[in-house]
Image (cartoon, rainbow, N blue to C red):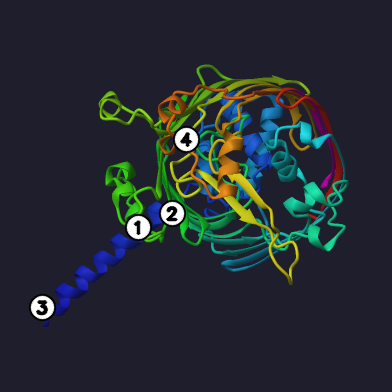
Amino acid sequence: MNIKRVFFNTVTEKLFIFSFLFFSLCNSYTEEISSYSKILYEYDSIFYDELHLTSLESGYVWLSYKKPASYAELKLNFDGINEKALSEHGKVSYENLYNMFYKSKPLLSYEQFAFDINLKLALQAQYLYNGEKEPFINKFHRYNKTPEPIAVPFEFYFSQYVYLYCVPVFGKNFSGSIHSYPYTNLPLAGNAMDYHFPKKTGLSIGNKFFNFHIGRGRLNVGRTLSGGMIISDTPDRLDFASASLFFKYVKLDMTVAEINPTRFFISHEISIRPLKQFSVTLHEGIILNSVFDPRFLNPFMIFHNYAPWKDPYINNNYNGNLIGCQLGFDINIIPVKNLRIYGQFGMNQFQTPSELKGGANNIPNSMGGIAGIEYSIPMQAGYLTLNTEFMYADPWLYIGDTGSKNSFSASRKENVYASKTYDTSEIKTWLTNPYGPDTLAAFFKADFNSPHKYRAAFTYRFLCKGENEEKFFNSIDKGEYYYPIHYKEGVKMAKWKTPTGTVSYFHTMQLESSYTIIKNLNINAALSWTIARGKINGHSVDFSTYIMYSLR
């Protein structure tokens, strides 16, 4: 008898059995969901709202309010909902979510492979009066809410663990929405066509506790009215890769977004839910204006402690200011059912007393925050949700000392003439805090919602804008560095408080409504009125209505 062979075979069999049992344990629920890896990539998906409202009604806070999320991660929040404690509308939403997780049926399926495709058609009428009298952020909000006339989303499933999606569209580009035929969502001229589609596409691999997603689309951290102090939802398309590990109480996440081939926004986060009523997300991010540095993929390394601004990165030979640093957190508390208290904090500079004594008094503190309260009232006809929020941003928040190189801003050019050249104008946005620095804002929103049936909402927004954001973007156009350390009066500039310069005050009131006529056919309308005082004087009116049909 060959003792070595017997021993080897025995050990091999045990290892095989152990590996099989371990994998089975890690990839099994008492009831299997349709896909672990599928991404809920539609940023405004009604299923996000249904999951949020039913969680509120159950007094159960989400582990992480980051979009987009995989089915497996969202399922963790779904598992915390107490169906028996829900109202009648809550139970309907719970059933909708259950069907999404467990009963989704692609158009075609064979063994471990499945394919799905849909057709969405939308026709919108738009009218904007005195657009120059509104804050520029409104143009991004309006564009992001504009439906594409034609969208053909399709999906591939390779088992429950691999998912691919793509949404080819026929629609209008951002420049066209402002300058060319702004009365409809149809691109009525060649230079109004968006040639950079798809805006949403990606590959996702994951199981019940892990997900890797390389995609294109919008990113966001937090559920707020102002868009988030940590990662902004304003850019309509970011190319990114993210990896996350999640459990009932803990989530680790890392995201790398490419702004251009030698400029990256890298972030990592840890989310903790020690109690079902409380969760916190700790976030650290950097802007890397050079070739990619793989050391930033270390999930538990503190980026700031690398002191990367001292390293000889490739862009512009040696320059110690190719790095921008960010620190922030997102807190959510549900002290009683239907009530959520939340807050966010973000910063990219803070000078300690020792640094100030050492001569760094011309470097400004750059911080901002959000505080809000949301109360949802389950009623016989639907949910009435009341939401109040306040936002503050320092004059230099997310502005770096080398302009666009290490600031948390982004820009892209649109190819509005497909065979000629790029548009001469750039689209400038913020990767963080969409309202930008030097801003005070207050929001109130009342929303009456019966998911999949109808919705009516009223929003009031007070916005106070200083001049520092405008000065920053103007300096980029001139190729200058706009930061206190570059000016003789830098010490004075570093002490500026929001708002600075000649201030603009905006009061905006908005009405929104939607109604599902029949299944897959709905109509939407929105009307807003903005009154401007201060540096900008006048008023602006914005109206839109559209009808949308989804084949499936």
Three-letter residue code for mark 3:
Ile
Crowding near the residue tagged with mark 1, few <14, some 14–19, many ≥20 C-alpha atoms within 10 Å: many
Of the pair 119 and 181, the residue shown nearer to us: 181
* Label disc, if present, on residue 63 of the rendered structure: 4
- The spot of residue 80 in percent (x, y) is 51, 33
Contact between marks 4 and 1 (CB within 8 A): the answer is: no
Q: Which residue position holds label 1?
A: 313
Q: Which residue position holds label 2?
A: 289
Crowding near the residue tagged with mark 4, few <14, some 14–19, many ≥20 C-alpha atoms within 10 Å: many
The quarter of the image holding the N terminus is bottom left
Dominant secondary structure (helix, strand or loop) of the stretch shown in magenta: strand
Going from N to C along the chain, the mark reached first, 4 or 1, is 4
Question: Measured along the vertical axis of the image, is residue 102 above or below residue 449?
Answer: below
Q: Which residue position holds label 3?
A: 3
Question: Measured along the vertical axis of the image, is residue 492 above or below residue 347?
Answer: above
Question: Measured along the vertical axis of the image, is residue 243 above or below residue 220?
Answer: below
